[in-house]
Amino acid sequence: MDFSFEVLKTDPSGARLGRLTTPHGVIETPAFMPVGTAASVKALTQNALEELGAGIILANTYHLYLRPGHELIRKLGGLHAFMSWHRAILTDSGGYQVFSLADLRKITDEGVRFRSHLDGSEHLLTPEKAAEIQLALGSDIAMVLDECIETPARREVAEAAVKRTTAWAGRARKYFEEFASRNGNPPQWQFGIVQGATFADLRRESARQLLDLNFPGYAVGGLAVGEPHELTCEMTAEATALLPTEKPRYLMGVGQPEQIPDYVARGIDMMDCVLPTRAARHACLYTSEGRVLIKNARYIEDQRPIDPHCKCAVCKRYTRAYLRYLFAAKEITAAILATHHNVQFYLDIMRQVREAITFGQLGNFTAELRARYLAGPA
Ligand SMILES: [Zn+2]
């Protein structure tokens, strides 16, 4: 097993420059992970992802379990071989999708019973099952099943969810460790997830309880789901203050481009977000000067690239006028080009963040990014 994590430098802000080594390559952290829900980052080929410099992508357990099925993927050599992606993959536990997508879900201490959003078939997702599916997929990093609740949450609800999340994490860890003792260590790291909604003491309690289970890495979940950005940062800081400095921390499902350095400054090493890919398909382009809504009539004759500061293949070659036309004509290429640029933009922000930490300039970089970004496009 070829896993390690090292912190190379810590910024006065709390930001960390690090290196995560996996059996599928070394990832410089802080890292952004593009989301490949159904074993595909929508509108991007694996070649394009390599060209963009993505070292790790995320795939969704819920989707792959329902279709094509984890047993088929195992039979075909695991997720890396199946999708021909030879860099790292992180899989979520399926919990978030069960709570947000599936019908008729019923939560008990045993797990979550739900109906597939595809064909209505009934399934039971337990902490053990989520671990089993991810071992079959063979992802580099697997997440434990946690209970996701709606925000804002009442305290009693959040408390009960923390309790259940800890119990489930314990069962997932046990399943994983028994698997390892039977079959030898799998080439996978399993991460625990800190919950606690927007209650600082519950976040601390959740982190403390998970520490006893000795995960090789920890995620912070259930944030950036509608609460104010300051509160997301505060809750993240409550969790990371208690997490071991020598282990990677992953903030799930964030965020807006100008918010990324704020999370890094709270000691976060990894993030994922559907925003760059989803927004691209809706003609929303992220640039160093803010969002460009490319369908707008003002771009009809605009001969400039999407972002004059971007070095991606799309900005080097195409004009805003052409992109606008492709969206208006509903050409498939519109989504492909827009996604390519947006993913480059997110990966570039992380490159710049890492550079800023290297030179002790994260504070200045963050202020400059926000000012430029919020001023909006010319
Ligand atoms: Zn570009």
Image (cartoon, helix red, strand yellow):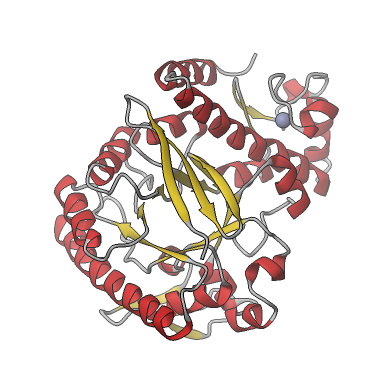
Residue 19 on image: x %, y %: 49, 43
Residue 26 on image: x %, y %: 57, 48
Residue 375 on image: x %, y %: 53, 15
In the picture, measured across the screen, residue 314 lies left or right of residue 223, that is right
Residue 147 found in image quarter: bottom left
In the picture, measured across the screen, residue 340 lies left or right of residue 259, that is right
Residue at the (79%, 19%) spot, across then down: 304
Is residue 113 something one can see in this rendering?
no
In the picture, measured across the screen, residue 229 lies left or right of residue 357, that is left
Residue 262 found in image quarter: top left
Location of the C terminus (image quadrant): top right
Relative to 130, say whether 50 is above or below.
above
Relative to 301, say whether 14 is above or below.
below
Q: Nearer the viewer, residue 202 or 138?
A: 138
Residue at the (43%, 17%) spot, across then down: 367
Q: How many marks?
A: 0
Residue 308 on image: x %, y %: 72, 19
Q: Nearer the viewer, residue 261 or 158?
A: 261
Relative to 264, say whether 36 is above or below.
below
Relative to 64, say whether 42 is above or below.
above
Q: Which quadrant contains ligand 1? A: top right
Residue at the (57%, 59%) spot, across then down: 89
Residue at the (76%, 23%) spot, across then down: 299
Residue 259 found in image quarter: top left
Q: Nearer the viewer, residue 236 or 247?
A: 247
Is residue 232 something one can see in this rendering?
yes
